[in-house]
Amino acid sequence: MTTFKYQLRKGGRKMVCPQCGQRRFVPYVLTEDNETIVNPDWGRCDRESSCGYWMKPSGNVQAPEAKVVAPVEPLRFLGIFGDFETKNSLLPYASWLIGSGNAEFAFERYHVKTCYGDWCLFWQVAKDGSVRAGKAIRYVNGHRDKTQKPPVRWLHKDKRFKNFFKGEALEQCFFGEHLLNGVAEGTKVAVVESEKTALLMSAIRPQYIWLAAGGSCNLSNPSKNKVLDGYDVTVFPDNGMFIKWRQIALPKGWKVNEVCLPQRDGMKEGYDVLDLYEKWAIDDEMRLTERLFLNREGGVQ
């Protein structure tokens, strides 16, 4: 595994963003100590939709020589654990939106489990079958419970589960990536940001294998998206992420769906393709989604 000279500083400390002026800026630091800031302009604002500032380190600034950092063993879970339970906080919403049978099938296919009582546990399982990460989220009426602190829990950080994983360096993959195992090149693959969206859209639009990047910035990871080589890939950016995802997708020959490009009436900023389907389902407009995808399967130039 490649070790870079600089990395985004780990931990919760933020600085003032040089572009938007909000304290949401994560600076690049020397990897060897996770402290030394070489250039205050190098970093990323986590206000991705409203600011989007991200300046990566360049070779134009003199910086102290970093020590060679020995590679660490990638984090791997020893197996998927936890039983599928009806008390999972996402299941009632999923059953309403796509039907209980479809919901149970999707949860099983994507290895979605339950932990922390009723939290929804999304396992990241790579194409080779290795279990990379466990991401837990609690839902209320189908939407993330933002009253939880933290709202997202990673199992590798929980000492109660230390016997279930080995290694030190988190190396994420796409949620749903295991479904590519044995799938022929040229197969249609759809990529969204949210695990929930990939899970439920797999029942709404089964012509695709639906994957989730797990975050708007995760699509640009070269080691992560290499697994998509050879497939007929269409990305579905959230509202506000179209330009960013388009810049990543087009050089790779991926298609870009524009259904969430406009700010539609009645939709909150940042909505995604599943939010749009939910709105139409509530409005009782074409429960099945031919309207949603009509004339939008191709890429934009």
Image (cartoon, helix red, strand yellow):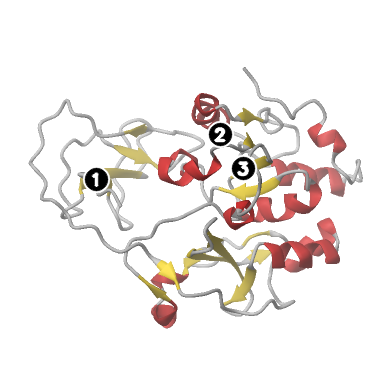
Placement of the C terminus among the 4 image quadrants:
top right
Q: Which residue is mark 1?
A: 4
C-alpha distance separating marks 1 and 2: 27 Å
Horizontal and vertical percent position of residue 233:
62, 36
Q: Secondary structure at mark 3?
A: strand
Horizontal side of residue 259 vs 11, given as left or right? right
Q: Nearer the viewer, residue 60 or 146?
A: 60
Q: Which residue is mark 2?
A: 241
C-alpha distance separating marks 3 and 2: 13 Å
Q: Nearer the viewer, mark 1 or mark 2?
A: 1
Report the residue at 66% width, 41% height from top. Answer: 190
* For residue 157, above or below residue 125: below
Q: Nearer the viewer, mark 3 or mark 2?
A: 3
Q: Secondary structure at mark 1?
A: loop
Horizontal and vertical percent position of residue 228:
55, 41
Q: Which residue is mark 3?
A: 191
Horizontal side of residue 249 vs 35, given as left or right? right
Q: Which callout, 1 or 2, points at the residue further toward the start of the chain?
A: 1
* For residue 245, above or below residue 275: above
Q: Which callout, 3 or 2, points at the residue further toward the start of the chain?
A: 3
Residue 93 appearing in the image: no
Q: Nearer the viewer, residue 52 or 106?
A: 106
Residue 260 appearing in the image: yes
- The amino acid type found where label 3 is placed reads Val
